[in-house]
Image (tube, helix red, strand yellow):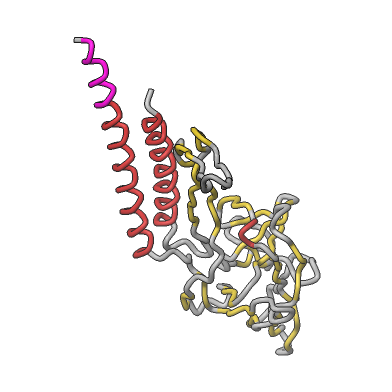
Amino acid sequence: MLRSMYAGISGMQNFQTKLDVIGNNIANVNTAGFKKGRVTFQDMMSQTTSGAQGATAERGGINPTQVGLGSQLGSIDNIQTQGFRQTTNNPLDLALQGDGMFALQGNGTTYYTRAGNFYLDDEGSIVNPDGYYLVGEDGAYPISIPDNAQSFSIQTNGTVNYVDAAGDTQEAGQIGVANFSNPSGLEKSGSSLFLNSENAGYTGLVVPEEDGAAQIISGSLEMSNVDLSEEFTEMITAQRGFQANTRIITTSDEILQELVNLKR
């Protein structure tokens, strides 16, 4: 069989994966805290028909002769760039401006997210849509606001203040920001949540605006970092790449047909 046919198959598989990632990016264009994916390719092993030879006194050196055997998936990266900020004027909508993630605690597991749409549960605790508690900078949770509070506010350094029944300002806690040396190493867990991994480089919870951590913007949401114009361009490129690889298979099949017809 022709090597080009198998090379075409590998190209089709890779471009299909690229289209899958692009489709997921576009589907989440309006998802709060979503981070887009990016696919990279690598060439597969090559078959060496003749090796390289060094120069001698009689002649110069010779380069190796190799035939590539297709492509393979290199990586699917999580691009952790800042998403655009949407103003909502809801005090429990929190956007991170800078590096870091919110830490959440639920079902005995710590999750991390950039999606800042939080709510108060029936006990006044700050939770995400799945009911996971927002974690403070000291690792304590939940951060709760009493039922008799007249109002509350969240500062850029994560401090949660409320006005009690007597009209005095009290502090309910301080929101923490989780820092990672390699946030792209986090594992997606669904629901705009991430899990820590061995390659994420978790450095701990810090106070917002300190040690290079992000500041918290109340009344805003960080939306996805998906650029539709970029995704549509990549989609066209992937589609044409897929079509070109199908042509490789078609052409290889025609060559095989010609070989079969030689005996007639």
Considering every residue shown, the one lying at the far bottom of the view is 167
Image coords of residue 150 (percent x, y): 64, 82
Is residue 262 on the magenta stretch?
Answer: yes
Please provide percent x and percent y for residue 143: 73, 70
What is the residue that sits farthest to the top in this orientation? 264
Residue 152 visible in rendering: no
Along the line of sight, the residue nearer the viewer: 185 or 188: 185
Q: Is residue 65 above or below residue 36?
A: above
Q: Is residue 146 left or right of residue 65?
A: right
In the image, residue 218 lies at what x, y percent? Answer: 58, 79
Quarter of the figure with the C terminus: top left
Q: Nearer the viewer, residue 159 or 52?
A: 52
- Name the spot of residue 13 as percent of width and height, x first: 42, 38
Residue at the image point whose x is 58% and y is 77% from the top: 97
The residue that appears at 50% across and 79% down in the rendered structure is 89
Q: Residue at x 48, y 68 (%)?
A: 223
> Is most of the magenta stretch helix, strand or loop?
helix
Identify the magenta region.
Answer: 254-263
Quadrant where the N terminus lies? top left
Task: Give the residue displayed 51% in from the left and 42% down from the top.
Answer: 64
Residue sitting farthest toward the left? 264
The stretch drawn in magenta includes residue 158: no
252 vs 178: above or below:
above
Q: Is residue 136 visible?
A: yes
Q: Relative to 250, is 185 on the left or the right?
A: right
